[in-house]
Amino acid sequence: MESELSFGDGLRATLGQPRAPRLLDSSPRSRVWRVELAAGPAVVKQVVGGADADERYAREVAALELAGAADEPVVPAVWGTDPSERVLVMAYVPHRRPAAGWIVRYARALAALHASGGPEVVDVLPRWRGPDDADVDSFLALADTLGARADPGVAAELRALTRRLATAPGRALLHGDPCPGNDLHTADGVTFIDLEGASWGSGLVELAYLRAGFPTCWCVTSATPALLDRAERAYAATWRARTGTDLRVDLADACAGWLIRGDALVERAHRGTVDQLARLPYEDWTWGTVSARERLAHRLAVVAELARGRAEVRGLAALCAELRDRMLAHWPTLRPAPARRP
């Protein structure tokens, strides 16, 4: 049975007999239970499904081990593993509804996670991969289809952008999907779970989630400029405290990278299947709190603002503003991203 708890003899020998197993909601790519063990309440996660299941399991174990070694870890403690069945046993972390302004605490924890990789992160996790030339071509084709004319230099701007993202400095331990639902809010702070997509690279590509509307997640939200500024300053302060180095928070490139990725409009199971941006002029679809067109319109506004005045993406800023205007003219019922997290 799919709901049958996977807890092998090796785990039982070290952790004891699990009691009162309860199947929890999870993605189709994992099965998750809450159990009671002699050491306390625990979560048992089994990574399943897909040709990359072994890789996802290995990434999560490696990321949890690195992050768990920090003085103040922001991930659950790992109590046991069973690689043969791709099973992880972790301490249970109780979650409570996030308070108003939750992105500030989230940003502090995200910086702590990013700072916890250490130099060995490059040896045990793959480098983060950003958009490529195919994404550039799809984005420009969408603009053309909707009648937004790009200046002749925009294609070159976007290809230079992809190169900057691919070589951006930084060896942060990246979560891979740091979205609402993968952040557990407690009295003491925020704990991150579900690190199957962990990698290393510039932490700015995930700090950009706050402005870009959580691009790999169902839960798109839009915070006020003042709250975003507080959260980004909290991230930089935590990074400085954890690493002893200063960080310049410039998110124009990172947000533009998420903008042109069509796969940031669909859930993980549908990524890499078709050109999602090519679908957008002819159909809309809802995933989570907004529709695909509403996601894109939100990101266009963000990039138009952040890129304005920057020589290397000046043409992109103008194109984003025009494309968003075209979208609102084509589809006047598009709504802004919600301010509150569900």
Image (cartoon, rainbow, N blue to C red):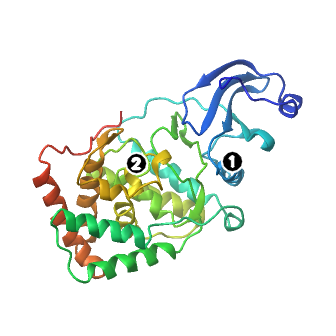
Q: How many marks?
A: 2
Residue at (67, 35) in percent of width and height: 45
Residue type of the residue flagged with mark 2: Val
Residue 4 appears in the figure: yes
Answer with mark 2 or mark 1, whichever residue precedes in sequence.
1
Q: In this view, does 324 lie to the left or right of 30?
A: left
Report x, y in % for residue 244. 58, 67
In the rendered image of this protein, does residue 339 appear above or below residue 59? above
Q: Residue 57: which disc?
A: 1
Q: In which quarter of the image is residue 77?
A: top right
User: In front: 45, or 223?
Assistant: 45
Q: Which residue does the numbered mark 2 point to in the structure image?
A: 266
Quadrant containing the C terminus is: top left
In the picture as drawn, the residue positioned furthest to the top comes out as 20
The mark lying in front, picked from 2 and 1, is 2
Q: Where, quadrant-wise, is the N terminus in this rendering?
A: top right
Instruction: Identify the residue at image location x=70%, y=23%.
Output: 4
Q: Evaluate whether residue 168 shows in this view.
A: no
Which one is nearer the viewer's eye here, 289 or 68?
A: 289
The residue lying toward the viewer, choosing from 172 and 281, is: 281
Q: Position of residue 169 (x, y in %)?
A: 53, 74
Compared to residue 150, the image places residue 74 above or below, namely: above
Q: Which amino acid does label 1 sit on?
A: Tyr
